[in-house]
Image: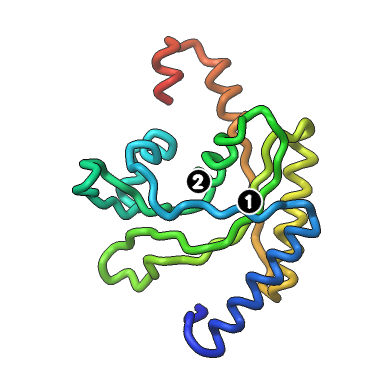
Amino acid sequence: MLIRIGPTLDRLAEMLKSLSGLFAEAGFARIEARHLFAAEQLIDLYGEDVRTRAYLLNDPLQGAELCLRPDFTVPIALAHGEGGWGRRAAYSYAGPVFRRQEAGSGRPIEYLQAGIESFGEADRDTADARILTLILRGLDALEAPPAAIRTGDLNIVFALLDALDMPPHRRAAL
């Protein structure tokens, strides 16, 4: 674990700069995402279970519940959507994310996350392969230990649901 003070802070900054350069060379534009979101918006997109891992705050001035970002996926998607969904774009990001932990777990509540997101690619399989290759290059540049790769495709789940005989409201709930 890297501690963000002294020489380790400098090393962390070097690592993030290295990743940022690698992502920029590959055509991923750097994007910044907000730290705080309306909790209702994130709960709608992540699902109710986000309450178990996210920091939720009451905003007495707005009378609403706020949420610190638990990761970058939805915040980056929301930022992309502000410019219109039907366009192609590739983004990179890096910054803190916040996750509640069980008492005594010893796990941090603040993580640094860096990554990339791609939208609007016509050939999704090629885009996925490109992204995986770039992530592996990034891990190699950081001299990370070998990664175990697991992939999944939600389209398989959706195809299964389409094949089952069930009422539309039940499929939507699943």
Q: Nearer the viewer, residue 68 or 164?
A: 68
> Where on the picture, by quarter, is residue 104?
bottom left
- Seen as rendered, the residue at the extreme bottom is 7
Left or right: 41, with 164 as reference point: left
> Where on the picture, by quarter, is residue 62?
top left
User: 169 above or below 2?
Assistant: above
The quarter in which the C terminus is drawn is top left
User: Which kind of residue does numbered mark 1 sit on?
Assistant: Arg
Marks 1/2: CA–CA distance: 24 Å
Write down the residue under mark 2. 75
- Seen as rendered, the residue at the extreme front is 61
Q: How many marks?
A: 2
Give the x, y percent position of residue 134: 75, 57
Which residue does the image show at 26% across and 52% down from the upper left?
57
Left or right: 70, with 28 as reference point: left
Give the x, y percent position of residue 39: 33, 42
**Label 1 or label 2, whichever comes before in sequence order:** 2
Which residue does the image show at 21% across and 47% down from the upper left?
61
User: 128 above or below 155?
Assistant: below
Write down the residue under mark 1. 150
Give the x, y percent position of residue 139: 69, 67
- Asked if the residues shown at circle 1 and circle 2 are in contact, with their CB atoms under 8 angstroms apart, the answer is no
- Looking at the rendered structure, the secondary structure element under dot 1 is loop
Q: Nearer the viewer, residue 144 or 66?
A: 66
User: Which kind of residue does numbered mark 2 sit on?
Assistant: Pro
Q: How is the image coloured?
A: rainbow
